[in-house]
Image (tube, rainbow, N blue to C red):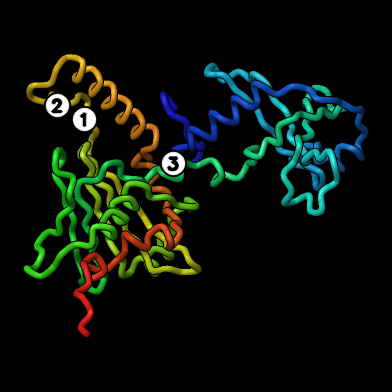
Amino acid sequence: DGDRWVVVGDGDFPADLAKVRGFVVKALGLKVGQSERLNAADRVRLQLDEPSAKEGGGTLVEFVGADNKPLASLIIGGKYFKRTPDDPKTAKADGRFVLRPSATDTAIIVADPLEQSVAKRTEWIDQRAFAAEEPLSIDVRHADGDHWRLEREPGGDDAWRLVDAKPKEKLNNTTVLSVAAAAGGLDFTDVVKRDPQREAKALAKPTVITTVTRDGLTYILRVGPAEDQKRYAVGEIKGELPTARKPVEGEKPEQAKARDKAFAERIARIKAHRPTDQSLAEYALVIPDTTLVDLTKKRADLLEKPPAKH
């Protein structure tokens, strides 16, 4: 979709560029290790039948050009092992059986196990699509009224401070760094179609996490309580990315060139990761509870504990 990869669907959620690139590079480099003749029973046994087959169906992979014309296709079947493993389902394969749809009587063994050859949508989505890169403020408001907000300056002083801190409140720097890292690296395991009934129950009393980045984007995440070690959440991203970097007073030409390059790379990276408003409106996020442990801490958990009295 333009300059980025998406998983086609109702919201065209961003795809994991590294996985896409890796799979394409492997496909381009596939070489025939050996081949053997097939009959109908062999195709079932090697999982090289059509994906729609009742049994023995493989995974059909089709490559299509920018003009929507097909470039190549193959059916990826079962794992290939040089020696029979104890458990074929969990053992690392030595290769893979594949089949050209134009030559259904010949099985080909390739040396790459092609582990990414899965048709499950969630295996291709960009799991960092809601990560707030370089956060400058993190605001967390719990349903019970507990609230805290961390801020830091956009340049120079990177120390975090607690907004409206009371005289005796002192931040635990280790904890705060973990919180900031969580906001900047938020992973999730799945995206699911938004369900009004589920939201009415799971998000009746949400924890609201609002993160603002150095580039002016605001990430708002409404998170429900943990259930089966996962949390249901809906997200929203507000703001527009800057089109140019603000020059630094007194910078030298070589410094400006390096900073302009870093700025362009960062903006391109954020654009590639960022979901569209439509995809966020269509899908909710399923986030492991362990990912949100730091971001859902209470205010008291961010503070240095007073020394124990003896």
Q: CA distance from mark 2 to mark 3?
A: 33 Å
- The quadrant of the picture occupied by the C terminus is bottom left
Q: Position of residue 195 (x, y in %)?
A: 44, 59
Secondary structure category for the residue under label 3: loop
Neighbor class of circle 2 (other Cα within 10 Å; few <14, some 14-19, many 20+) is few
Determine whether 286 is above or below 31 in the image.
below
Which residue has dot 3 on it? 11
Q: Position of residue 51 (x, y in %)?
A: 74, 40
**What is the three-letter code of the residue carrying label 3?**
Gly
Residue shown at 13% from the left, 68% from the top: 169
Q: CA distance from mark 1 to mark 2?
A: 9 Å
Q: Is residue 307 left or right of residue 269?
A: left
In terms of depth relative to the viewer, which is nearer, 215 or 294? Answer: 294
**What is the three-letter code of the residue carrying label 1?**
Pro
Secondary structure category for the residue under label 1: loop
Residue shown at 13% from the left, 24% from the top: 247
Q: Earlier in the sequence, mark 3 or mark 1?
A: 3
| Comparing labels 1 and 2, the label whose residue is closer to the camera | 2
Q: CA distance from mark 3 to mark 1?
A: 24 Å
Residue shown at 81% from the left, 40% from the top: 81
Which residue has dot 1 on it? 242
Q: Which mark, by number, is residue 246?
A: 2
| Comparing labels 2 and 3, the label whose residue is closer to the camera | 2
Determine whether 26 is above or below 151 in the image.
above
**What is the three-letter code of the residue carrying label 2?**
Lys
Tag 2 and tag 3, C-beta contact below 8 Å = no
